[in-house]
């Protein structure tokens, strides 16, 4: 197991979920980034989410 003090000296690897502005900043610093293009279901509309929830089996 890696001790906390050793983590500081490890290269950073980031999974970015949905916020595009973080990607470029991290890449400019040489950080390895994996981007997941995630958005809330139904655009975050709670009424549509309720309808979709009722459709699930």
Image (spheres, grey):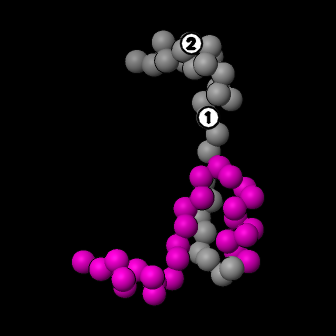
- In the rendered image of this protein, does residue 56 appear above or below residue 23? above
- In the rendered image of this protein, does residue 13 appear above or below residue 53? below
Is 5 on the left or on the right of 10, as rendered? Answer: left
Give the extent of the magenta segment: 1-28
Q: Quadrant of the N terminus?
A: bottom left
When asked about the image quadrant of residue 41, the answer is: top right
Magenta span includes 30: no
Circle 2 is placed at which residue position? 51
In front: 8, or 47? 8
Give coordinates of residue 33: x percent, y percent.
Answer: 60, 69
- In the rendered image of this protein, does residue 9 appear above or below residue 46? below
| Other residues around mark 1 within 10 Å, as few (<14) / some (14–19) / many (≥20) | few
Give coordinates of residue 19: x percent, y percent.
Answer: 68, 52
When asked about the image quadrant of residue 10, the answer is: bottom left
Q: Are the two marked residues, 1 and 2, in contact with CB atoms closer than 8 angstroms?
A: no
Judged from the image, the secondary structure of the residue bearing numbered disc 2 is helix
Nearest to the eye among marks 1 and 2: give it. Answer: 1
First in sequence, mark 1 or 2: give its number: 1
Give coordinates of residue 53: x percent, y percent.
Answer: 49, 18
Judged from the image, the secondary structure of the residue bearing numbered disc 1 is loop
In front: 4, or 37? 4
Give coordinates of residue 22: x percent, y percent.
Answer: 69, 61
Q: Which mark is residue 40?
A: 1
């Amino acid at each position: 197991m890696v001790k906390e003090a050793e983590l500081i000296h490890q290269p950073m690897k980031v999974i970015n979920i949905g916020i595009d502005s973080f990607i470029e900043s991290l890449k400019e610093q040489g950080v390895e980034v994996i981007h997941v293009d995630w958005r809330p279901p139904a655009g975050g509309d709670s009424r549509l989410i309720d309808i979709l929830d009722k459709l699930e089996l």
